Image (cartoon, rainbow, N blue to C red):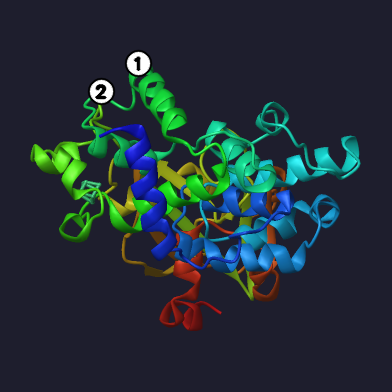
């Protein structure tokens, strides 16, 4: 496949298959940046309502900069990879305070923003300012490796260089924004990872992977990802209409989100008395003053590098042991609970009506 032919076929396909998305044709770099950060590691269908909500709540970068951190986290709740929300907020403040609220207009300056990597910088630069920078992400690796038949592993330095150079060669420098959108859409909707639509593909005749029967094996990755297993036991300790929660600290997943008192293990704990005797629980309740009301089913959560199994122990006490504030806990009411941002699994658990009704 020649770069020029690829470009022509891709643009022709895009002309007939344009996905109508709210950020398409958008020239406001603030909205483009918002949509790109939301879409990092998130499917379009999932990200769409979040984009609309952010736009509505924070119509300018100044509004986002002035928002309370908890408000931003609450709006982000359920989207995962929460460092994106923290970076979004920090960057909005940086632009509002140090750049007079004016979004940077060169690729190099955009790349300096917190939370913005080469892919996002190329997307913003091309969509907002028509600057000739090619996007390279999972979609692009897949489309290029298949059409051009490149088996260099995409997670190696030589692979990254080779694909970046090819992406630049294929880019339509007269309309980089349209081209970038086209290759992203083609990868997301047509040349998909599991069932690409080769039967009615405009690249058919020239696609090396199809011609050489390599669609299934391209793109190539050198390493298999091993996932770390974690077991979380959350104690939903209730006294009257209050439960104990704490904000998660830095250095781990879900930083800045709230959670219940947690016992963590790297293996499943079968022995219930080991859980009841755990230090964290003993710190918060008196041995003679508690009743275990229910132990939830196991909720599974799979992240990029880890697999987490989560159970909730619902416990009733007359009163919390004194000193819980010193350990970072707060006793909050049901109404307050609704205003806090939790990891998705805790939200799922809380929205499970059969449990919530009994709990509160
Ligand atoms: S023929 Fe199949 S593998 Fe090749 S570009 Fe089209 S959809 Fe992708």
- The x and y percentages for residue 76 are 61, 58
Q: Is residue 255 visible?
A: no
Query: Which label sits on residue 346?
Result: none
Could you classify mark 1 by the number of other residues whose Cα lies within 10 Å: few (under 14), some (14-19), or many (20 or more)? Answer: few
88 and 209: which is toward the camera: 209
Q: Please, which residue is most extreme toward the top here?
A: 158
Position of the N terminus by quadrant: top left
Q: Residue at x 33, y 40 (%)?
A: 5
Q: Decide: marks 2, 1 in contact (CB < 8 A)?
A: yes
Could you classify mark 2 by the number of other residues whose Cα lies within 10 Å: few (under 14), some (14-19), or many (20 or more)? Answer: some
Q: Is residue 161 visible?
A: yes
110 and 5: which is toward the camera: 5
In this picture, residue 90 sits left or right of residue 83:
right
Whichever of callouts 2 and 1 sits on the residue coming sooner in the sequence is 2
- The x and y percentages for residue 112 are 69, 28
Position of the C terminus by quadrant: bottom right
Q: Residue at x 58, y 49 (%)?
A: 36
Q: Secondary structure at mark 2?
A: loop
Q: Which residue, given by chain and number where applicable, does mark 2 sit on?
A: 152
Q: Residue at x 30, y 56 (%)?
A: 190
Q: Is mark 2 within 8 Å of ligand 1?
A: no
Q: Secondary structure at mark 1?
A: helix
- The x and y percentages for residue 134 are 51, 35
In this picture, residue 275 sits left or right of residue 63:
left
Q: Is residue 160 above or below residue 298?
A: above
Q: Which residue, given by chain and number where applicable, does mark 1 sit on?
A: 158
231 and 89: which is toward the camera: 89
- The x and y percentages for residue 98 are 88, 35
Q: Is residue 266 above or below residue 191?
A: above
Q: Is residue 353 above or below residue 172?
A: below
Residue 349: name its quadrant. Answer: bottom left
Q: Is mark 1 within 8 Å of ligand 1?
A: no
């Amino acid at each position: 496949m020649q770069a020029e032919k690829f470009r022509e076929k891709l643009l022709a396909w895009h002309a007939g298959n344009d996905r109508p998305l709210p950020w398409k044709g958008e020239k406001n770099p603030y909205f483009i940046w918002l949509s790109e950060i939301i879409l990092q590691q998130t499917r379009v269908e999932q990200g769409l309502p979040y984009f609309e909500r952010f736009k509505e709540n924070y119509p300018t970068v100044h509004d986002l900069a002035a928002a309370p951190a908890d408000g931003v986290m609450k709006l982000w709740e359920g989207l995962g990879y929460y460092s994106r929300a923290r970076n979004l907020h920090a960057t909005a403040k940086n632009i509002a305070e140090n750049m007079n609220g004016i979004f940077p207009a060169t690729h190099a300056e955009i790349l300096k923003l917190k939370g913005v990597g080469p892919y996002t910088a190329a997307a913003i630069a091309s969509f907002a300012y028509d600057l000739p920078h090619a996007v390279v992400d999972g979609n692009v690796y897949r489309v290029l490796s298949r059409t051009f038949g490149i088996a260099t592993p995409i997670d190696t330095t030589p692979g990254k260089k080779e694909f970046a150079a090819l992406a630049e060669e294929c880019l339509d420098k007269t309309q980089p924004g349209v081209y970038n959108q086209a290759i992203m859409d083609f990868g997301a909707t047509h040349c998909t990872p599991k069932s690409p639509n080769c039967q009615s593909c405009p690249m058919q005749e020239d696609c090396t992977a199809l011609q050489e029967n390599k669609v299934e094996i391209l793109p190539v990755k050198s390493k298999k990802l091993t996932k770390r297993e974690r077991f979380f036991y959350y104690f939903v300790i209730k006294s009257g209409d209050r439960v104990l929660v704490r904000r998660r600290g830095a250095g781990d997943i879900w930083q800045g989100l709230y959670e219940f008192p947690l016992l963590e293990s790297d293996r499943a704990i079968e022995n219930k008395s080991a859980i009841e005797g755990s230090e964290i629980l003993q710190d918060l309740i008196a041995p003679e003053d508690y009743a275990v009301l229910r132990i939830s089913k196991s909720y599974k959560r799979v992240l990029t590098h880890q697999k987490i199994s989560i159970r909730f122990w619902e416990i009733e006490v007359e009163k919390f042991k004194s000193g819980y504030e010193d350990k970072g806990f707060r006793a909050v009411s049901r109404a307050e609970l609704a205003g806090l941002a939790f990891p998705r699994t805790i939200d799922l658990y809380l929205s499970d009506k059969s449990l919530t009704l009994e709990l509160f």
